[in-house]
Amino acid sequence: MKNFYRSIFTITTLALCTLTAFSQTKKVLLDSMIRKANSDGLFSGNILIVDNGKEVYKNALGFTDELKTKKLTLDYRFHIGSIAKEFNAVGIMMLKEQGKLNLDDRLSKFFPDWPKWADSVSVKNLLQYTSGIPDVKWKTVKGDADDMADLMKLKKLDFAPGTNYHYNNNNVFIQRRIIEKLSGLPFNQFVAEKMLKPAGMKTAVVDPIESTPLMAKSYTNAGKHGDLIYPITGWTAVTLDDFYKWEQCIEKLKLINPASTRELLTPYAPGKQAGLGGGIMQGNKVVLHKHDGISVFYQALLIGEQPMGRVIILLSNNNQNNIFEIGDAVEAILNGKPFEQPKKPEKK
């Protein structure tokens, strides 16, 4: 009997050692891959990788701005581009759960002095980018008031609501204005009080400016600086830790219920964006949540895969349009498969 237990102990010990060695190998490969991408000028930013519910890699690589005199740390915030649209989408569903709106409500309910087309556009159309409302006039709009004035002057939609898809920021802009009307709070205050605080996101900032402390500045490899000036407001900057907390709020349904979350993961058509980007629910569980964002020279990627206890977060202030390639390499390493090292773009 003693030999039996000794054998069980030996097998268990060997299995644990093998698993530990395998995990250490993954860490080495992840570190090697991302450091080479950084040294090749293909990635500047912060990265967090969680697998099987445990943090397996976390690092800050690169510089805080185009001067390249100060290195990034894990305390720096990054603009996350379109991923910030999740905050207004979740805000809309929070108000729905409170009985303050329905998804089939028309925009004329909130903006009675808008043109006739507002009678045909629903809140759900905004969430699914099927409103037919044209994009923000980026060349002339200098602030929220300008965009609101343009909407007031809009004579007709680009297509009948619900018949087509056009991913654009006016759908987002209007969601934020609805939230302000129904909550009685400026959008940035609503996000801070109703989402960031409950999520424990203590260092996230809505609408950061150049002087915001610990804000990574975006830049190109040629040294061009990306200004933190945006024509419309409502954009949230986060650290790795804050972003992970947000992903956990979505995955664990902490802010909105399963039905609301499913609504925000349901696109107009396969392959199109929804309120939370893209994802899959099985029953009342979020099994996949994937979203990316670009703004000026920032780029961000979020991948959450609940069955594997996996979260991958990439935040870059030096967009090389290769963040998906890096994400694919991370996934391959975690899955124990061969991976392709991100490469420099071929010279034309």
Image (cartoon, rainbow, N blue to C red):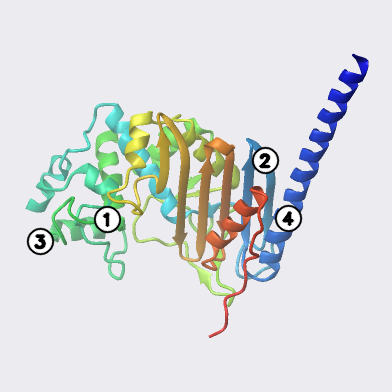
Residue 69 seen? no
Which badge, 1 or 4, comes first in the chain's sequence?
4
What residue is at 25 percent from the left and 35 percent from the top?
182
Q: Which residue, given by chain and number where applicable, does mark 4 sit on?
A: 29
**Three-letter code for the amino acid on which mark 2 is drawn:** Glu
SS for tag 3?
Answer: loop
SS for tag 1?
Answer: helix
What quarter of the picture does the N terminus occupy? top right
Q: Which residue, given by chain and number where applicable, does mark 1 sit on?
A: 170
Of the numbered discs in the image, which one, if any, rests on residue 155?
3
Q: Residues within 10 Å of mark 4 (few under 14, many from 20)?
A: some
Q: Residues within 10 Å of mark 2 (few under 14, many from 20)?
A: few
Q: CA distance from mark 4 to mark 3?
A: 56 Å
Give the side of residue 179 with respect to residue 35, left or right: left
Q: Residue 256: x and y, percent? A: 38, 31
Q: Which residue, given by chain and number where applicable, does mark 2 sit on?
A: 55
Q: CA distance from mark 4 to mark 2?
A: 15 Å
